[in-house]
Image (cartoon, grey):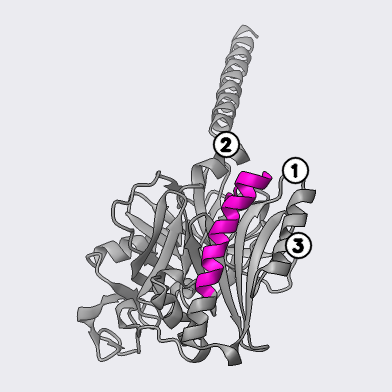
Amino acid sequence: MQVFLLKSLAFTFDYLCLLCNFTSLKLSAKKYLLSVKEIIDNFKNVIIQIATPFSTGTGFYLKDWHLIVTNEHVVRDNKEVIVDGEDFEKALVRVLYTDVKYDLAFIECPQNFQLPEVNLHEDKDYAEGDPVIAIGHPFGLKYTATQGIISNTSHVQEEINYLQHDAALNPGNSGGPLVNQRGEIIGVNTFIVRNGQNIGFSLPAFYLQQSLEDYKANGNEISARCSSCFNVVDEKKVNNGYCGICGSKIKLPSFAEEYEPYGVEKTIEELLEKLGYDVRLARRGPSNWEIIKGSAKINISYYEKNGLIIGDAYLCVLPSENILPIYEFLLRRNYETESLTFSVKGNDIILSLLIYDRYLNIETGVKLFEHLFEKADYFDNILVEEYGAGWKTE
């Protein structure tokens, strides 16, 4: 009886120890969980805006690899893309690697590039119901982060397992990271279901890790993964546009043709060049350009369907009080200012120029856009300094 009692006490003691250790481990794990604000703050500086003449998207910086990661479809048919971020100036950089199998691309970093480190989590220890945050930064829009949960850990498409989640993804978010509660990247946001209610899919991080290792093993040369044999090949392994290993057609980033605008778009770019702007850095997707003049940001858009070219200069923002004098000023200027119109959208004050494409030529276009740029910077200062408007912040 005494032996049985001692054994029971020993078992109870061992069980309590095990329970205490388990509880301790759970408490320890909880300590490593970050708040949503902490995660957003940690990622704000490593999220990159990406723009080409054809599309816009998001990327993120991996310090261990000194590369910017995004989707292949964001940079497709471009040997160079525009990148912009919180802590560095807009720059034109090369596309180093494309991977159509996993829809991944690696982009080089601008010179003197120093950004914080974030961790890639390649383990498959996630489960349905786990909270996640999808982070993106569509070009020209504010940094965005949306919360959701993983609803499926193995959505299979073309033999690839994707993470399905309900964190809202918007056009332009492609290539951004999917982050867990510990602030680790567990996936790359890749596609959404059209007209779906927040149904998004992310490529798990272990696929990204595999591509990073394959790219490095190939000597960090400009390269691409062959869509047939899945080998990573560089320029030395490509023969007249065909994979030197399996013979399938392959297109490396360096083989992409230079973008050549035509028609009205060509005219717009020519007049911007005459005004001293680098059109390669101004491009921000199809038929769109962005110009910075002093404190004003000007978006230029061409709508071929109705033949309209619109230049919208986003100036300052309305103050929270004493707004009537600003409205009076804007109405007077609309009466007096030739070819330009003031409007208010939300609390943004916008100065706009509208031209029909059939009336556009280099000579008149240069005069009209130069007038818009100069007046945008001028009125921005007047409205802030004399009428109490607020400077616009991103």
Of helix, strand and loop, which one carries label 1?
Answer: loop
Pointer 1 residue: 320
**Residue 378 visible somewhere in the drawing:** yes
Would residue 132 appear left or right of 343 to someone viewing this image? Answer: left
Query: How far apart are the two marked residues, 3 and 2, measured between alpha carbons?
Result: 49 Å
Magenta highlight range:
369-394
Looking at the picture, which amino acid does disc 3 mark? Leu
Secondary structure under tag 3 reads helix
Q: Is label 3 or label 2 in front?
A: 3
Quarter-wise, where is residue 233 in the image?
bottom left
Please tell me the numbered disc located at residue 34.
2
Task: Tell me the kind of residue under disc 2.
Answer: Leu
**In the image, farthest residue toward the left:** 236
Residue 112, compared with residue 182, is above or below; it is: below
The stretch drawn in magenta includes residue 126? no
Left of 337 or right of it: where is 238?
A: left
Q: Gap between marks 1 and 3, in whole Å?
A: 19 Å
Q: Secondary structure at mark 2?
A: loop
Q: Which quarter of the figure is the N terminus placed in? A: top right
Which-is-in-front pick, marks 1 and 3? 3
Q: Nearer the viewer, residue 285 or 64?
A: 285
Indicate left or right for 63 with 9 as reference: left
Which residue is located at x 71 percent, y 45 percent? 319
> Residue 322 location, x and y as percent?
77, 43
Return the mark for residue 331.
3
